[in-house]
Amino acid sequence: MSDESNSTVPVVGKTRQAASKWKSGKGYTLHGSVFGGCTHSQVLALMGEEVPPPPAFMQKLFDAGHESERVAKEWLRSQGVRVKDVEGTTTRADGTCYENQIELKTFFDVPRDSTSVLLSLHLDGILQAGLTFPIHPAYSLPPCQWRGEVWRGEMAILEHKALSPDKFDAFVAGGIPAVSRRYAWQCSAAIVLGRLHLEKKRTPNPTLPLVFSVERRDYDSATRTYSLSGVRAFQLLREPIYDLAAIEDRCVNGVVGNYLDGIVPECDSEYPCDYAKKDQRSPVECNEHVALAEEYHNHQSDVAYHQAAMLALRPRLWAIATPLGGLAKAGPYVVDARVDKRGREYFSVKKETE
């Protein structure tokens, strides 16, 4: 099975598409960070709609969230909790910086077009500690409090968020579902995929829970700056809010199914998604640049046409190369069509230099 998703999470640079199609044409990738969001944005992404990069103030929100996660992990470690994560960042050739995180993946079959959909998500960390940490009465009081049942130190997935004062209060009062349906889907997927991963590794842990950690994020309207309060709250989620069957249905029928039907559902996110925001904007006239826009559009159409034509020719070339060991030469052209030991497909056609 070909896996053509990135294994890193974008931190700075451009907006990650809510969903993407594999270059081979044999599947789709849905990203855990937006999995619980509206299917509207994910279907549009599969249709090739581009979304603009986030505005500057959103980057400040992202930065505050990353700092909150870092400080929260330091605090947990200071209390004797073992926090496993992947430290450091990766900088790509285009200058885009990505934060390395623990990745979980699973595939679902899409019978309608004989493809697969890959759900890929990244964990903030894995927790484990002795029994004394969560039982200590000080941890049930501000500035650190638990929502519902306390965590007793067994292995657990960590998901951390920095929330506005209103959202923080909603979490303390009603837990994850009171804050965001998107978070409920993300946390459920983390538990389900975590258990599947351990089962595949032959170290099953059917009771693997998730600790949802939040910190109140304050905002100063005078200086337009965000600050972290140090006030934290936690919830232990022992079972996913949405089970494996619901997650598979959302991937296969909710996102890919609507895409195959050409149906774009209305945006049902708590906040307008990036695509909905894009639709709400009105373009400003700049007719002096018609020629430049027209040239780009024409090139874009050519790329789409040629890519479709390439995918149509691929099965014929694959059928030629396979009986010849997967590597065939037709004049100056070398066709490489093979499947590696892990079941991943590779295909290329290169022209030899004279």
Image (cartoon, rainbow, N blue to C red):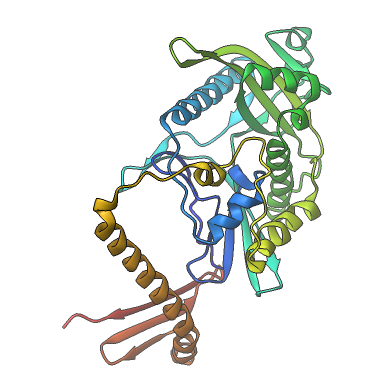
- Corner quadrant of residue 185: top right
Q: Residue furthest left?
A: 354
Question: Relative to 209, does residue 265 appear above or below in the rendering?
Answer: below
Which sits in the foreground, 191 or 131? Answer: 191
Question: How far across and how far down the image is residue 282, in percent?
Answer: 45, 43
User: Viewed as shown, does residue 140 lie left or right of 106?
Assistant: right
Question: How far across and how far down the image is residue 120, in percent?
Answer: 60, 51
Question: How far across and how far down the image is residue 298, in percent?
Answer: 33, 68
- Corner quadrant of residue 254: bottom right
Which sits in the foreground, 197 or 20? Answer: 20
Question: Relative to 151, does residue 28 appear above or below in the rendering?
Answer: below
Which sits in the foreground, 212 or 279? Answer: 279
Write the residue at 74% across / 14% down: 145
Write the residue at 59% across / 15% down: 78
Question: Relative to 305, does residue 124 appear above or below in the rendering?
Answer: above
Question: How far across and how far down the image is residue 17, in percent?
Answer: 50, 50
Write the residue at 26% across / 81% down: 351
Q: Quadrant of the C terminus?
A: bottom left
